[in-house]
Amino acid sequence: MNAEPPAAMPIALRAIANITVLSGALQMVKPGWVLGRLSPQPAPLARHLFGTIGMFMVVCGGTLRRSLAARNPDPGLLVWAALQKLGASGAVGIGVRRRLFSPQALLVAAFDLASGLGCLICAWQLRHNATGGDNADLLTVRTRG
């Protein structure tokens, strides 16, 4: 069976992975500069934690990128990338609601929401095509053996 999702989906997700890595690296190196555009008064602790989050963005974006580079991308890794993106979207939305971030940060939340949904759709398509429709263990990451 063909395990390929539509050609545009992996291309879009590779772009998202690249954006995640680059924006995470910028956030990691210049957390005060990035946070200053999203938050009215970033404190030193907030800048530090924001930089730490940037490091995790680099790792998650790199994992997504690596997964998509494989001949047969692992749907389980795409689901985990989706969970990171959806969680980030929710966290940013909560931050805006609590007035920790400016409403401009909702653009970041929307990007992460769309990215997470894209990862879920691609994972579902890969799994559906590879198993003939059985998506029961979509959260399981394949191991080499």
Image (cartoon, rainbow, N blue to C red):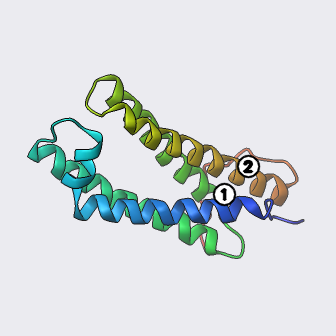
Q: Are marks 2 and 1 in contact (CB under 8 Å)?
A: yes
Quadrant of the rendered structure where residue 67 is? bottom right
Q: Residue at x 35, y 23 (%)?
A: 97
> x, y percentage for residue 95?
32, 31
Q: Residue at x 9, y 47 (%)?
A: 44
> x, y percentage for residue 144?
61, 74
Q: Residues within 10 Å of mark 2 (few under 14, many from 20)?
A: many
Residue 137 against residue 63 in the figure, above or below: above
Is residue 90 shown left or right of residue 30? right
Residue 93 against residue 28 in the figure, above or below: above
Is residue 68 shown left or right of residue 48? right
Q: Residue at x 87, y 66 (%)?
A: 2
Residue 95 against residue 69 in the figure, above or below: above
Q: Residues within 10 Å of mark 1 (few under 14, many from 20)?
A: many
Q: Which residue is mark 2?
A: 124
- The amino acid type found where label 2 is placed reads Trp
Between residue 37 and residue 48, name the one nearer to us: 37
Residue 42 against residue 72 in the figure, above or below: above
Q: Which residue is mark 1?
A: 75
State the SS at label 2. helix
Q: Quadrant of the C terminus?
A: bottom right
- The amino acid type found where label 1 is placed reads Pro
Between residue 117 and residue 107, name the one nearer to us: 107
